[in-house]
Amino acid sequence: MPRNNLVNQVILILIDDLRAAHLFDLINKGKTPNIAQIAKNGISSQNCITSFPSVTFPCYSNVIIGSYSGYFPKEGSGTPMYHWVGRSYPLMEEKKFPIIRNYGKGNHLLKLNKDIGPNCQTIFEQAGEGNFLSSLNLINRGSVLIPPVEYTSSSIFKGVEKSFIDPQSLFPEKDVPKVAVAYIPKTDDLMHNKGFDHPEYIKEIINCDRYIGSLIKTLKNTGYYDSTAIAIISDHGNYKSEKMYDIAPFFKECGFTQYLPKKGTGDFDCHMGGLSFFNFPGENWYHHPTLEQLKKFAPEGVSSNGLNVFDTLWKIPGVKAMYYRDNNNTPDKGIIYLEHKEVETGKKFTDIIEYEGHGKNQKTKYVPDDKDFYKYSKNEESARLIDGKSHSIDEWLKVTNQIDFPIVVDQVPRYFKNPRSCDIITSTLGEYGFGYDHGKTVASHPYTHDIGIKKSMTVPFIIGGSPNVPSLELPYCKTTDMVPTLLYLLGEKPHYSVVGKSVIG
Ligand SMILES: [Zn+2]
């Protein structure tokens, strides 16, 4: 038996694509009374900061592991993004050329549990002995996965209820699950296709509240309510792009041709929303290019002496910032460049982000140019950390949780350290969306999430249910704090890879 546990079971509900301000607005209007009750009597924060980039994978997987991307052969999650090129480590599935992973495609989602790698653990793997349940939850390593009877939010919640009514049908040990995770994808689907202000999206959140009400009833009827903590979180918020732009003709004109992993042909791969992620071959596709190679790049489609990739990407409409790594970076230490442009004058600046250390011990320093892209210098709190010194994630969180680009100085190196990360990220800050993936413009919806602005980075953080969960309102926290807090309630210790911290105890 775990020592000093406050509850015997936890249920974690991840509602995809739910901005904190939107949920708490519904709570204040009395539209979601069950979630309101859980938040009121338990732990709640209207200002929980998620990972950057604010995209489902990695944000969702980071919630379930309590950690972030990093140099995953040694530490952190191997899933840096929704879309990535396999590069040099490991030689993926003995394929001849590096693979492209795209979780939106075919069976790629099934690889997610393997992709996160062995140096981080799911909440199930960290929670000691017991039965573990995933209701649709895709990051389910260490648990029994039940598919929903039908692909509705109602059915996913019913799966959790069933494990408390009839545990013997799922677990040979007959005990109810110590940790159950339910993942609700429908809200994300509605947000992209209809919008965060559309009645159908809002109705789905209100429906989730009803299903949570039903779950509470079942827990009370089965006698588990007082010993069960119910947690609610999301992977990211959202925003609406001002304009959509079909970028495909531009790349054709540049002579860039899509990389095809089966044949090993092509010289470029990218995934573009408000943030765009560009991959180019170095010596070959197993190697990231050096800065010199990117400045004199010879696309297969043109016969010139080569073009400067940086100059070329600056021509994309709406690009306001560009990130890329230094040639000499190692997993332990390195530099990320953040070039940005003043809109009015076109003048360019280069901020620098330096990093050292791993996982929870990573420290980062922000060295802005004459003007700083994140505008940290304009805010009294955040300006204090532009002091020529290196700082931890929690130091950044403390001073940036109220403004755009919260904790992003910490997050950018975690992304670029991953060998699966891209070579150049550009941002339009939401002015333009592109919906471009694998050589094609595929989406035309302006509603999305990915950039570092606050509304895309802030989610609700709620834990309640059992009267043993303390009543606490947090001015801020981060999504990776959820797993260590739930483990604390269960009397279990987090894995060494966990970057988040319990918000109690
Ligand atoms: Zn999502």
Image (cartoon, rainbow, N blue to C red):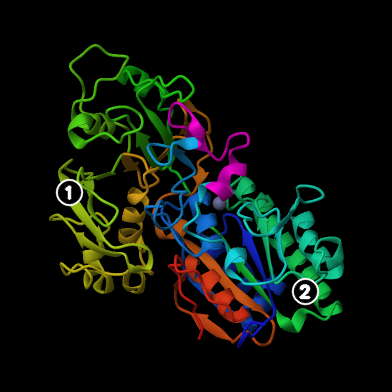
Which residues are the magenta region? 93-114
Which quadrant holds residue 464? Answer: bottom right
Residue 156 x, y percent position in the rendering: 75, 56
User: Is residue 8 one of those drawn in magenta?
Assistant: no
Depicted 330 relative to depicted 34: above or below: above
Q: Is mark 1 within 8 Å of ligand 1?
A: no
Residue pushed farthest top? 303
Q: Is residue 311 above or below residue 120?
A: above
Mark 2 and mark 1 residues within 8 Å of each other at the beta carbon: no
Is residue 193 among the parts visible in the rendering? no
Marks 2 and 1, the one that precedes in the sequence: 2
Outermost front residue: 94
Disc 2 to disc 1, C-alpha distance = 52 Å
Residue 83 seen from this side: yes
Left or right: residue 22 compared with residue 8: left
Q: Residue at x 65, y 64 (%)?
A: 13
For image coordinates 25% across by 51% down, the residue present is 330
Pick out the residue farthest to the left: 370
Residue ID for mark 1: 350
Residue type at numbered disc 2: Ile
Label 1: state its secondary structure: strand
Q: Where, by quadrant of the figure, is residue 139 drawn?
A: bottom right
Q: Amino acid at mark 1?
A: Thr
Q: Pointer 2: what residue?
A: 216
Residue 49 against residue 106 in the figure, above or below: below
